[in-house]
Amino acid sequence: MSPAFIMFFGPPGCGKGTQAKKVTDELPLVQISTGELFRKHLGEKTPLGLEAQKYMSQGALVPDEITIGMVRERLEEPDCHNGAIFDGFPRTGDQALALDNLLAEMNSKLHMVVDFELPIEISRQRLMARQEGRTDDKPEVIEKRLNDHAAIEASVMPHYHAHKGLVKTVDANRPIDVIYQDVMALIKPLVG
Ligand code: AMP
């Protein structure tokens, strides 16, 4: 069975991380969340983590070079051999091109983009209510991340919409388990 590579896209608070966790509990895929990888590095106080934190605490994107290098390293780990769900990556046009290249080097490609649609007002409410104690879940940083999402969408999604049928849309304004059923119906056939 060849590996399946899937990208989850959506605004902050759309639940894509939660869905990626649920899918990877059930299917032999790994979740590659660049936000979580950065937070892990920060927890371990690695130079990469400390550098990334300068950007993350402002709600700014970490530079492409750092982000792409980190994803490359993660993809080289053996647990990725069945495939992965990218969560929060790519967020720039250059990251999208880099991902295509990384997967091509593995003789593979991106098989699907799942676009989690959520009205911005609901996204804002969910982030305000989030109690994970993340340093970027502060009101002013939340506003910046919400605004930036529109720019991220504009720089990343045209790349994928150019491939007919690659992008699948899911209504993220529903209960977690209902969304999960739709997500699994999309992904399971890719994993075999
Ligand atoms: P997230 O957990 O996906 O909301 O990411 C938290 C923060 O990590 C973001 O606000 C960025 O500062 C940084 N980050 C995560 N993924 C990326 C990425 N693909 N490119 C640049 N910065 C990122």
Image (tube, grey):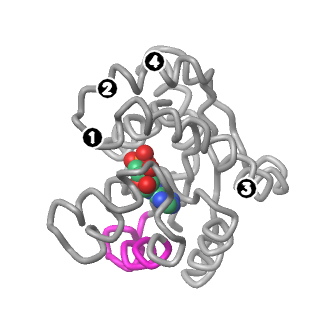
Q: Distance between the residues labelled 1 and 2?
A: 9 Å
Query: What residue is rendered at 63% in x and 28% in y?
Result: 117
Disc on the earlier residue, 3 or 1: 1
Q: Distance between the residues labelled 3 and 1?
A: 26 Å
Query: What residue is rendered at 50% in x and 30% in y?
Result: 14
Label 4: state its secondary structure: helix
Label 3: state its secondary structure: helix
Report if the CB atoms under discs 3 and 1 are less than 8 Å apart: no
Disc on the earlier residue, 3 or 4: 4
The crowd level at tag 4 (other Cα within 10 Å; few <14, some 14-19, many 20+) is few
Label 2: state its secondary structure: loop
Where residue 153 appears, as percent x and y from the top left, is 69, 46
Using the image as rendered, state which of residue 190 and residue 30 is in the foreground.
Answer: 30
Please name the amino acid that badge 2 sits on.
Answer: Arg
Name the magenta segment's main secondary structure: helix
Q: Quadrant of residue 44?
A: bottom left
Please name the amino acid that badge 3 sits on.
Answer: Ser
The crowd level at tag 3 (other Cα within 10 Å; few <14, some 14-19, many 20+) is some
The residue wearing badge 2 is: 130
Label 1: state its secondary structure: loop
Q: Quadrant of residue 141?
A: top left
- Give the magenta-colored segment's residue range: 68-82
Q: Residue 125 carries which label?
A: 4
Ligand 1 appears in which quadrant? bottom left
Report if the CB atoms under discs 4 and 1 are less than 8 Å apart: no
Magenta segment includes 9: no
The residue wearing badge 1 is: 134
Q: Which mark is residue 155?
A: 3
Q: Under 8 Å from ligand 1: the CB of mark 1?
A: yes
Residue 33 visible (yes or no): no
Please name the amino acid that badge 4 sits on.
Answer: Gln
Disc on the earlier residue, 2 or 3: 2
